[in-house]
Each structure stands twice: as structure tokens, then as C-alpha cells.
Image (cartoon, rainbow, N blue to C red):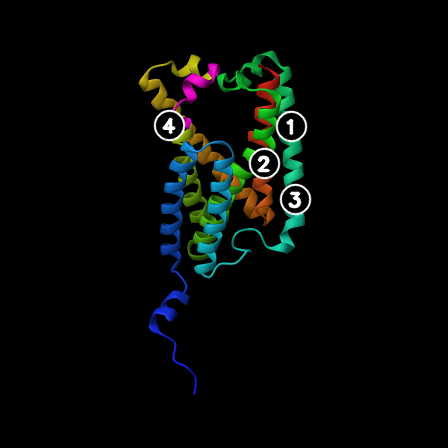
């Protein structure tokens, strides 16, 4: 005679609703945003990796798969080709910008003044790919995009993912107006200028989120936006350090 399954066990195995999973993901990201803003360095990397795994678990509990996250094995080779092409494109654009006097000042950043070569390499090849790109791409273009895509389509998935991606950058942008001389000359050092710089950063990163979502949609792989995201951040560190 088969054993009866307790009601509690059945409830635990029941898949999460899509919007419940979205709400859980947003709540986890809210807490994580505060945590990674406080914990820098390798603690931030550990947090990012753990949260990335947790969010993929939320997607799975909602009935999602690796394909919903843009990580289906069959799409990885295509995604890697897209990523390499995008990295090369960013490298060419950054090189041209660094060589032209009119755009060279855009790479100036006071945050580089106290760094040495080893710290910049750590940021470019460890902290950025694991602490920033992995978490943000899995969260916004992987889990959130994949969840909303299943019930509302690509337009809604892009809108929700990109809006939340912009808001995710409020805390990292608080000192942006004073850290980058090119922005200080535009916004000044007042509280209003700082607020405008934060608003501009949110709008810019939301627009970047739209581009990242479109790359994920066209390539069919999360590796494409990951490649562009890493190149913009990591090569920006390298260029800014070399031109300080």
C-alpha cells in the first residue's frame, strides 16, 4: 500500500507562480544591492556567486529551465561568438576614445588615483566578471527576463528587466558626479547636481539594459550581454588606469 504524502511536502514541491517568483527575485536583489554596496572585494564576489545560484533556484522552482535563463547548452557556442565580437568592438571604441584628445577626458576617474596595477587587474578579471557581470546578467537578463518572457513576451520582459536594472544602480552612482571630472564639470558638486547625476546614471543603465536584453534575445544566449557588460566595465578600468 503506497504511503500518503503529507500536505506540507506536496506544498513544498508545488511550483512557484511566475509573479511570486518575480517578487522573490526583486526582494532578494534589494537586500543584495545593500549588501554588495557595503561589502567590497572578495566578500562581494562570494555574495554575488551565492545570490546568482539562489536566483537560478528561484527560476527552477517556478518551473523555469536553463533555456529560460539564456544558458541552454546548445546556445553557448553562439553566445560565445557574439561575446568575443562585442568585446573586440568595445576595445576598438575605447582605443579610439583614448587616443583622441576630445574624448580622452571621459576616461578620467578619481577612483583610479590610489590603485596600482595589481588592483586594477583584480578588478578587471575577478571582481567585474564574478562580482558584477555574473550577478547582474543572471538576475536581470537571465532570471527576471526569463520569468516575465514566459507570461508577457519580450517587450514586457525587456521593460521590467531594464527598469529594475536602472534602479539597481542608484547606490553605486551616489558619488558619481564628484568621482569623474567630466561629470563634475556638468553637474557641479551640489546636492542637486549629485541627484541629477544619479538620475542620469539610472536612465543610462536602464537604456543599457534594453540593449543587453536585445542581445540576449537575438543571440539566444546570456553570454552575449555578459561579454559586452564585461568589456564596458573591465576595459573601462584598464583604460582609465592607463590614462590617469
Q: Which residues are magenta?
A: 173-182
Q: Residues within 10 Å of mark 1 (few under 14, many from 20)?
A: some
Label number found at residue 228: 2
Question: Tag 4 or tag 3, which sits nearer the N-term?
Answer: 3
Quarter of the rendering containing residue 83:
top right
* Residue with the mark numbered 3: 80
Q: CA distance from mark 3 to mark 4?
A: 33 Å
Mark 3 crowdedness (10 Å alpha carbons): few <14, some 14-19, many ≥20: some
Position of residue 18 measured from the top left corner of the image (x, y, whole percent): 40, 57
Asked which secondary structure carries label 3, the reply is helix
Which residue carries the number 4 mark? Answer: 199
Q: Which residue is mark 1?
A: 91
Whether residue 212 is situated above or below residue 18 in the rendered picture:
above
Instruction: Say whether residue 141 is left or right of residue 163.
Output: right
Question: Which element is circle 2 on?
Answer: helix
Q: Do the numbered discs 2 and 3 sit on residues whose CB atoms are within 8 Å?
A: no
Nearest to the observer: residue 29 or residue 78: 29
**In contact (CB < 8 Å): disc 1 and disc 3:** no
Of the numbered discs 2 and 3, the one sitting upstream in the chain is 3
CB atoms at circles 3 and 4 under 8 Å apart? no
Residue at screen point 64% across, 55% down: 74
Give me the residue at 53% from left, 40% from top. Answer: 212
Q: Give yes or no for residue 181 being in the magenta stretch.
A: yes
Q: Earlier in the sequence, mark 2 or mark 1?
A: 1
Marks 2 and 4 sit apart, C-alpha to C-alpha, by 23 Å
- Please give the name of the residue rendered at 46% of the width and 45% of the height, measured from the top-left corner: 158
Residue 201 shows up from this direction: yes
Amino acid at each position: 500500500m503506497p504511503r500518503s504524502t503529507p500536505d506540507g511536502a506536496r506544498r513544498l514541491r508545488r511550483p512557484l507562480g511566475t509573479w511570486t517568483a518575480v517578487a522573490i527575485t526583486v526582494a532578494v536583489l534589494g537586500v543584495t544591492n545593500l549588501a554588495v554596496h557595503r561589502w567590497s572585494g572578495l566578500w562581494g564576489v562570494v555574495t554575488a556567486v551565492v545570490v546568482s545560484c539562489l536566483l537560478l533556484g528561484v527560476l527552477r522552482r517556478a518551473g523555469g529551465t536553463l533555456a529560460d535563463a539564456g544558458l541552454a547548452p546548445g546556445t553557448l557556442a553562439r553566445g560565445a561568438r557574439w561575446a568575443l565580437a562585442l568585446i573586440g568592438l568595445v576595445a576598438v571604441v575605447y582605443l579610439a576614445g583614448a587616443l583622441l584628445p576630445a574624448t580622452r577626458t571621459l576616461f578620467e576617474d578619481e577612483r583610479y588615483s590610489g590603485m596600482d596595477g595589481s588592483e586594477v587587474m583584480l578588478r578587471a578579471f575577478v571582481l567585474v566578471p564574478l562580482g558584477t557581470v555574473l550577478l547582474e546578467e543572471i538576475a536581470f537578463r537571465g532570471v527576471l527576463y526569463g520569468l516575465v518572457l514566459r507570461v508577457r513576451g519580450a517587450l514586457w520582459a525587456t521593460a521590467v528587466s531594464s527598469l529594475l536594472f536602472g534602479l539597481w544602480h542608484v547606490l553605486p552612482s551616489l558619488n558619481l558626479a564628484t568621482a569623474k571630472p567630466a561629470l563634475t564639470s556638468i553637474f557641479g558638486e551640489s546636492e542637486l547636481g549629485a541627484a541629477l547625476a544619479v538620475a542620469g546614471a539610472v536612465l543610462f543603465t536602464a537604456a543599457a539594459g534594453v540593449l543587453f536584453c536585445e542581445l540576449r534575445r537575438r543571440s539566444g544566449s546570456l553570454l552575449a550581454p555578459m561579454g559586452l557588460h564585461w568589456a564596458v566595465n573591465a576595459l573601462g578600468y584598464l583604460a582609465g588606469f592607463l590614462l590617469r
